[in-house]
Image (cartoon, helix red, strand yellow):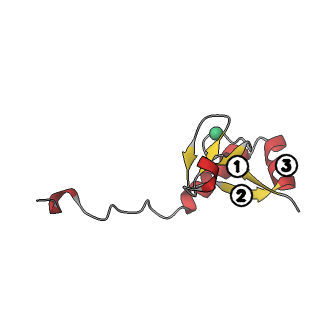
Amino acid sequence: MTRVLVCPVCGSNEIELDSGGYTGKYMCKECGYVGSFIIEMSESEYRELKEAGELERFINEKKKELPKEKKPEKYPYENP
Ligand SMILES: [Zn+2]
């Protein structure tokens, strides 16, 4: 089964690895989103969600499952 990568911002599946994959991030060719968070699903699932108009809702659900953004290694108040 073909897997597709879906942009969490615009729902496009026109996703490429950013900078040829060096950064480990993805880039959306539609809206220019760059980030390590991307939604992966099967092609048929993607098509069904899109046809049902449920893609946006699905993406929002996925976003809720996200762990909180990694904290910066140093807090600002720890700086000299
Ligand atoms: Zn996008």
Q: Which mark is residue 40?
A: 2
Numbered disc 3: secondary structure: helix
In three-dimensional space, the C-alpha distance between marks 1 and 2, rounded to whole angstroms, equals 6 Å
Residue located beneath label 3 in the image: 48
Is 28 or 43 nearer to us in this picture?
28
Quadrant of ligand 1: it is: top right
Q: Position of residue 56 (x, y in %)?
A: 67, 44
Q: Earlier in the sequence, mark 3 or mark 2?
A: 2
Amino acid type, residue under disc 3 in the picture: Glu
Count residues near mark 1 (Cα–Cα under 10 Å), then give few for <14, some for 14-19, many for 20+. Answer: many
Residue at image position (67%, 34%) is: 30
Instruction: Find the residue positioned furthest to the left.
Output: 80
Q: Which mark is residue 6?
A: 1
Q: Position of residue 16 (x, y in %)?
A: 69, 47
In three-dimensional space, the C-alpha distance between marks 3 and 2, rounded to whole angstroms, equals 14 Å
In three-dimensional space, the C-alpha distance between marks 1 and 3, rounded to whole angstroms, equals 13 Å
Q: Earlier in the sequence, mark 1 or mark 2?
A: 1
Residue at image position (33%, 61%) is: 72
Answer yes or no: do the residues labelled 1 and 2 have beta carbons within 8 Å?
yes
Q: Position of residue 41 (x, y in %)?
A: 76, 58
Quadrant of the frame with the N terminus: bottom right
Residue at image position (57%, 62%) is: 65
